[in-house]
Image: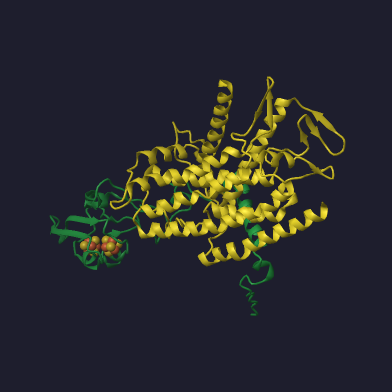
Chain colours: A green, B yellow
Amino acid sequence: MAMVVKDNNGQGFLEKIYIPEIIRGLLVTSRHFFKNLFNIKQVPTIYYPEERTEVKWGLSPRWRGRHRLTRKDDGMPRCTACMLCATACPSHCIYIEPTESADPAVEKYPAVFMIDELRCVFCGLCVEACPCDAIRMDSGIYSLTEYSRANFLYEKDVLMATERGYKD
Amino acid sequence: MILDALIILIKLALVLGMIMNLAGLLTWAERKQSALMQDRIGPNRANIFGFTFYGLLHPIADGIKLITKEDFIPARANKAIHSLAPAVAMFPALVTYAVIPFGDILRVGGREINLQVADLSVGIIFIFSIASLAIYGVMLGGWSSHNNYSLLGGLRAAAQMISYEIAMGLSIVGLLMIYGTVELDDLVRQQGYLIGGWLPQWGIVVQPAAFFLFLCAAIAENKRTPFDLPEGESEIIGYFLEYSGMRFGMFFLAEFADIVVASALLTTLFFGGWQIPFLMADGFHLPGGFSLALPHLLVVVLQVAAFGLKVVFFCWFLLLVRWTLPRFRYDQLMRLGWKYLFPLTLANIFITGLIVLALA
Ligand code: SF4
Ligand code: SF4
């Protein structure tokens, strides 16, 4: 395929005397100015807290949001407290306390499952490590806001209460 | 006597009110205009009971914020000069405005009121002498902070302003040669004459080259992009590095007041000041012989309005330039000032002289 490389690097005479190029630049910016002045609605800005991208465009299914723990049919966590996620986590922000389960079919489950979302780098390695599909990052929550650092330690009950955030 | 003093006070209040309000409005206009130019929305959050007034409340919110902020003075700074510098920076912008005429002579009740705060016989020279004081605010601010970065910023500013002051002063010499006066009200009055009966004798018509040279030098004097190396707010930081609260705000406001002054000067020198084409003291006289008589008061109001509109237009234009062009490198800045603008202004004076001589 023939390719034409126009390589004058602004060295043509008109570019060198600079003034026509300045006027061209001013025309471009003032065109945008007047276009938006008379029709501000066409500006692609999203008014964030009132308007949200996931509502407007939807999130990608691969997108990593805040963690959630999936549940079995009986409402217990799918997690078997195998510690694989805590081991895989590069920022060591998953804290699990395993305990024996009353259910004879289940060996153990996490009595405490805590993620420090401030230390989490949202790499998703915990999700990949989990053999039971017990931890997922498909909550669709990207705005994590709390009033204190301690509140960023998300406990099992919060993580389990979160539902899948978006449709495929 | 008392009436005279009262009239001067009213004129002062009018001019100061206009310049300070316009400077305050420009802080809003700059954000809103840059937003529109870049396909954004701009300030729209500050509100009173949900009414945002197109973001117009932001300057007020900023003012409250700046006044209530901590006023920090570095430990080893020179406290007196550090506190004084913002005022020194603000002062020239406000004082230069005194000699700029914003309307023709107003006649009420047998009294002639010159719509100009101070009718000095040295007009334009006064403006340049005061404008060169603006360097002090910047340099003192940079030096007294006891911080190498602000010192360097102050030095950059001083070098730049001195260089461009020369081009600025020389660029209007041709204009003064043609009009033969340095008094600004006289200068504006002469711009009302028509060349060949239809072309207003505005500065841009008789001295187009000088207009571009002056515009360029005026933007450089304002220390704004593309000549914003003294501050370089996005990365290098300048002379006001150690300032906070309203003291920083005063440097900031001085910059906007400088824009208003530059716009007023551009209007007065090159765009006929308060003149409206074909509007004489007694009404419109179009070249085709058509004329429309207007009462004196209406004419004066129209003229003052025309002056205000022109100033606002140039404020808009200067903001447009600021948000369009990228910054120069420092050597490019110096080269432009000394190797291009300076010789060009000299050439402009020479050619104007030749033409004036040939026509005489
Ligand atoms: S996303 Fe990464 S950093 Fe966050 S908890 Fe999972 S493994 Fe740890
Ligand atoms: S890897 Fe899965 S099953 Fe194992 S502890 Fe983590 S969440 Fe629970």
> Nearest the camera: B194 or B63?
B194
Image-based side of A150 in relation to B211, left or right: left
Q: Is residue B191 above or below residue B153?
A: above
| Label tally | 0
Image-based side of A57 in relation to B181, left or right: left
What residue appears at the point 57 percent right and 38 percent down from the top-left corner? Answer: B98
Residue at the extreme right of the image, as rendered: B289
> Nearest the camera: A65 or B99?
B99
Residue B163: % across, % down: 55, 59
What residue appears at the point 27 percent right and 56 percent down from the top-left corner? Answer: A118
Residue B158: % across, % down: 48, 57
Q: Give residue A132's quadrant in the image.
A: bottom left
Q: Give residue B299's quadrant in the image.
A: top right
Assign ligand 2 to one image quadrant.
Answer: bottom left
Residue B360: % across, % down: 82, 51
Quarter of the picture holding the N terminus of chain B: top right
Residue at the extreme top of the image, as rendered: B109
Residue at the extreme bottom of the image, as rendered: A1
The answer to whether residue B227 is visible is no
Q: Give residue A107's quadrant in the image.
A: bottom left
The answer to whether residue B233 is visible is yes
What residue appears at the point 76 percent right and 31 percent down from the top-left corner? Answer: B281
Residue B61: % across, % down: 42, 38
> Nearest the camera: B206 or B119?
B119
Q: Is residue B4 above or below residue A110?
A: above
Image-based side of B145 in relation to B94, left or right: left
